[in-house]
Amino acid sequence: MSIFCIGRNYVEHAHELGNEVPTSAIIFMKPDAALLPKGENFSIPSFTNDLHFEGELVLRVSKKGKNLAAQHPYGIPVIEYCDAISVGIDFTARDLQNKLKEKGLPWEKAKAFDNAAILGEWHPLTAEILAGPIHYTLSKNGTTVQTGDSSLMIFPLDKILAGITEYFTIYPGDLIYTGTPAGVGPTAKGDVFEGFFEGQSVFSLKVNS
Ligand code: ZN
């Protein structure tokens, strides 16, 4: 299974971290071991003092695909290649990521470490959902910290599939984290996160104290 992630897919989030708004989708990946097993608590890794949460919409791939933009010149039918959607967290060791970026080094240590990907319960993907806008939120200790709206994505879901499959073949079971809206922030021991897809809770995550 591949876990594809999109960076800086919302203008306000790019600005809050002082980054430029990208002109093509920023793609990075996490290995299988980055996915926190269902029901397990999460621990802050010892190598970071600034672990950020990034709440994101997540797609599940259901069909093999490559070079989808070329195959679908009139628009990629997302529903043909993805069958489920949920909300997750792309945990990021921001202090480490900043150091790596300064040196022009890859991000993996900061974003692809064990348990850095949180995934909620799936909702079947329907044409109605895809017609959008899709709404989701992330709460921390009972307070909403991030509000997502798919209509504000710089690269919407079909463009994300185009961007990924220009370089990588997607396979059934692959996951796509679609980028975080503004409002990312630090994680502390004992925090409780909850993800909501269209107002419905899809995960609750306790950070070990
Ligand atoms: Zn992210």
Image: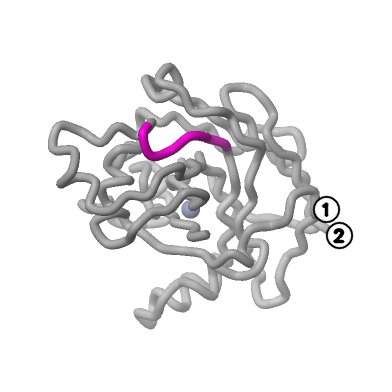
Please name the amino acid that badge 1 sits on. Answer: Gly
Q: Quadrant of the C terminus?
A: bottom right
Q: Residue 162 at what x, y percent from top left?
A: 26, 47
Q: How is the image coloured?
A: one colour
Regarding mark 1 in the picture, which secondary structure is present there? Answer: loop
Amino acid type at circle 2 is: Ser
* Residue 15 seen in render: no
- Ligand 1 within 8 Å of disc 2? The answer is no
Observer-nearest residue: 166 or 41? Answer: 166
Residue 89 screen position, x and y as percent: 59, 49
Residue range corresponding to the magenta coloring? 80-86
Q: Is residue 208 magenta?
A: no
Q: Position of residue 64 (x, y in %)?
A: 37, 49
Asked where in the image residue 160 lies, by quadrant, the reply is top left
Q: Are marks 2 and 1 in contact (CB under 8 Å)?
A: yes
Rendered image quadrant of residue 18: bottom left
Left or right relative to 42: residue 58: left
- The residue that appears at 39% across and 77% down in the rendered structure is 102
Q: Is residue 162 above or below residue 29?
A: above
Would residue 84 be counted in the magenta stretch? yes
Residue 180, compared with residue 198, is above or below; it is: below
In the image, 209: left or right of 122?
right
Which residue is found at the position 28% from the left and 55% from the top? 20
Marked residue nearer the N-terminal end (2 or 1): 1
Which residue does the image show at 61% across and 38% down from the upper left? Answer: 145
Q: State the residue position of label 1.
A: 190
Residue named by callout 2? 209
Determine the secondary structure under disc 2: loop
Disc tally is 2
> Looking at the image, which residue is at 69% across and 29% down?
201
Q: Is residue 182 above or below residue 47?
A: above
